[in-house]
Image (cartoon, grey):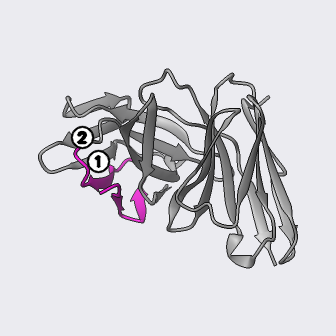
């Protein structure tokens, strides 16, 4: 119930192409879906996030698409650049009471953008 | 200076040794976390603390202990390290008033147990 399934585990995209990472969840109580980006040697950092009341959120070249009925969401990176090479984690948050939020991460996707 | 600082950044130790990983933060957040990252397994929560008097186990707490010495300091201990505890460890903080619970991570501590 608390799992977030992420695919693919690794992805190689040519410069200028579109990178697509998919995530699926089961728990309909999840109410916030962030994506974290992690560069080698660094900790993850919040990249973009969406709430289930919208179907799409765009920030620059990064777009989250959200399908509530299918319980799926995905990250699209348009015009992918070598600097986008990183590991991406999807996540889902559910309110667990007393001001506490429980965050569940997907297993991550290692993206390599080749020139 | 980093908002979330972890020491040491790298450590090699032997089976059976006691190891402490330290975390300090300047973000003023009450909530602090320890995660473990393994290739293909993602980020798994070891322990978390919502304030100095509050310590909670995460999904993989066996073999680990923590201490919250102050609002800004949260340390992770391995009482008797074993090789399958070789991993990258991250400390993180969050603001309890942030409904999304954004996590702010340190740069990680790479631990190798021989």
Question: Residue visible at 68% across and 24% down?
Answer: B27
Q: Are marks 2 and 1 on the same chain?
A: yes
Locate residue B57, reporting x and y percent: 58, 52
Residue receiving disc 2: A65
Magenta span contains residue A17:
yes
Task: Determine the CA span between mark 2 and mark 1.
Answer: 5 Å
Q: Which residues are magenta?
A: A1-28
Q: Which residue is mark 1?
A: A74
> Circles 2 and 1: CB distance less than 8 Å?
yes
Q: Which mark is residue A83?
A: none
Q: Residue at x 49, y 20 (%)?
A: B97
At numbered mark 2, what does the secondary structure look like: helix, strand or loop? strand
Q: Badge 1, how many Cα within 10 Å: few under 14, some, many 20+? A: many
Q: Position of residue A20 (x, y in %)?
A: 32, 52
Q: Is residue A6 magenta?
A: yes
What secondary structure is found at the residue carrying circle 1? strand
Q: Quadrant of residue B60?
A: bottom right
Chain containing the residue with disc 1: A
């Amino acid at each position: 119930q608390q799992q977030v399934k992420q695919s693919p585990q690794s992805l190689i995209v040519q410069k200028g192409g579109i990178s697509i990472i998919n995530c699926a969840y089961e728990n309909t109580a999840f109410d916030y879906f962030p994506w974290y980006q992690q560069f080698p040697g660094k900790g993850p950092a919040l990249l973009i996030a969406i709430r289930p009341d919208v179907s799409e959120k765009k920030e620059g070249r990064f777009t989250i698409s959200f399908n509530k009925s299918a319980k799926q969401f995905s990250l699209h990176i348009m015009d992918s650049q070598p600097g986008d090479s990183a590991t991406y984690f999807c996540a889902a948050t559910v309110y667990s009471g007393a001001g506490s939020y429980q965050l569940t991460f997907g297993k991550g996707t290692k993206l390599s953008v080749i020139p | 200076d980093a908002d979330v600082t972890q020491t040491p950044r790298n450590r090699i130790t032997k089976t059976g040794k006691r190891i402490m990983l330290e975390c300090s933060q300047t973000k003023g957040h009450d909530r602090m976390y320890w995660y473990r990252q393994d290739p293909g397994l993602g980020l798994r929560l070891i322990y978390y603390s919502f304030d100095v008097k509050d310590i909670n186990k995460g999904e993989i707490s066996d073999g680990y202990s923590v201490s919250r010495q102050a609002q800004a300091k949260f340390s992770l201990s391995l009482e008797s390290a074993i090789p399958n505890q070789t991993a990258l460890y991250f400390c993180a903080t969050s603001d309890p008033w942030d409904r999304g619970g954004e996590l702010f991570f340190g740069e990680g501590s790479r631990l190798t147990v021989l």
